Image: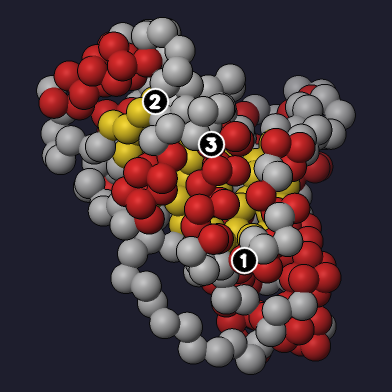
Amino acid sequence: MNLGLINDAINGDRRSLARTLSGIENGTLNIMEIQQNADIPHRIDSGNWKSLAITGAPGVGKSCLIDKLLSIWAGSGIKIALLAIDPSSPRTGGALLGDRVRITSVDDDSLKENIYIRSIATRKSSGNVPLIVADMVEFLHMAGWERVVIETVGSGQSEVRCAAIADRIVVVEGPARGDGVQAEKAGLLELADAVIVNKSDLKGAEKHAEELLESFELGLGDVPPVMLTSALNETGISEAADALLDLPDTGRSVRARWRERLLAHYERKILESPDLEEILSLLAVGSISVDEAINTLGGQ
């Protein structure tokens, strides 16, 4: 382990930060070893969330909305990092990593010192948020980044995996996305600490927000805030930024979060097994059953 590299990253060197995060992502650096050996300064706990997952279906404007939020937060002096998750091809393993195209706030000279952006591919993870992202979030906190936003892939119900690693969960919706029943099917009633209906300049946004509120009122726990924004017209953005910065835990996702963390721990055990490739080859030729593979990998 290159302690010099890691300590440079913790002390603010961005090149070292990028290399350290790559090591964590690739599995060559272990977060527990870093915690035990690196020179980590004491950080003051803000008392609120440290990681915020922003999820939602493709096309609702997550990246543009996040760009506006980053500008406001960084402009107020908060050091904030964005981990943008992109899906990997199940066949080639490649990923577009295109979220950076829509994030322009980091190019602002007055803001860029307070913003850090990194794209991450899902790789072998069965969920849309790689398990290793939790370790990357932890290291960013060690390096002085006060808040970390996780932008998830955005493909519907499988977004539940973001519950495994985030302190708060924000769901971004758009106009004409369906009624409250669709919201319940997507897991919003169980997971959302807040909902943002973006593209409020389009017809149907207010109606959709009302339907979401009606659905939430039928569920358990506190009703999460439902906010209307337009990233295009920059309406409602400042209000949403203020509300999200001090967003309380509604308690809606506590059970789901621990369920996903339990599943994530088991999944990591399987994915990090040195015998995984051999087991996959045996499954491909029919030499063993799925149950036998699970027993072999899960029992290690």
Q: Is residue 240 above or below residue 159?
A: below
Q: Residue at x 28, y 31 (%)?
A: 226
Apparent side of residue 14 relative to residue 262 in the rendered image (left or right): right
Quadrant location of the N terminus?
Answer: bottom right
Horizontal and vertical percent for residue 83?
63, 51
Q: Is residue 212 above or below residue 283?
A: above
> Quick one: label 3, few (<14), some, or many (20+) residues within 10 Å?
many
Residue 146 visible in the shown view? yes
* Residue identified by numbered label 2: 197
> Quick one: label 2, few (<14), some, or many (20+) residues within 10 Å?
many
Amino acid type assigned to the residue bearing label 1 in the image? Asn
Q: Which mark is residue 114?
A: 1
Amino acid type assigned to the residue bearing label 3 in the image? Leu
Q: Secondary structure at mark 2?
A: strand
Tags 3 and 2 in contact by the CB under 8 Å rule? no
Give the CA distance from mark 3 to mark 2: 11 Å
* Residue identified by numbered label 3: 65
Q: Earlier in the sequence, mark 3 or mark 2?
A: 3
Q: Secondary structure at mark 1?
A: helix
Instruction: Determine which quarter of the picture holds residue 151.
Output: top right
Give the CA distance from mark 2 to mark 1: 27 Å
